[in-house]
Image (cartoon, grey):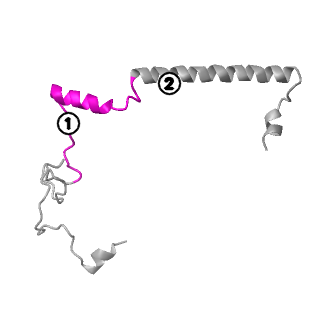
Amino acid sequence: MKYKNLLKGIPWRFGPNWPGKRCEAKTRKGTPCQRPAKLPVGRCRLHGGASTGTRTEAGLARLAASKTKHGRYTKIEKAKAKARAQIGREIWKELKEIENWGIEHGYLKKNWRKDFYI
């Protein structure tokens, strides 16, 4: 199936005579990219030139400070979260033991949750 715009003879918007700025990054083929340059660095969205990150001591310090602003994922907070999770697991284990005791002594039916929840 052919596309409708090709059947109508509409030329490609960024053809060889397009007056705008080209990306001109080196493609895999070795030729310059002919896509329009949209980014501030003068490249197309495919060849935008991702940042390699900071390399100086001052830049690395700024990056570390910006990443630990809220303190949610610090080692101390992770340790507290693990401790809370362990307490929760212990509570569930005790509740399960109480439930089993209630079933063994006849206070609860084996499938008591089906009757309890509607």
Determine which residue is flagged by label 2.
81
- Magenta segment includes 104: no
**Residue, x 75% and y 19% (percent of image)?**
97
| Residue 95, above or below 40 | above
* Quarter of the rendering containing residue 114: top right
Q: Quadrant of the N terminus?
A: bottom left
Mark 2 or 1: in front is 2
| Residue 83, above or below 52 | above
- Magenta segment includes 59: yes
Q: Which x, y percent locates residue 30?
A: 13, 48
Which is nearer the eye, 23 or 115?
Answer: 115
Q: Which residues are magenta?
A: 45-74
* Quarter of the rendering containing residue 33: bottom left
Q: Does dot 2 land on a helix, a strand or a loop?
A: helix
* Mark carried by residue 52: 1
Q: Which x, y percent locates residue 93?
A: 68, 20
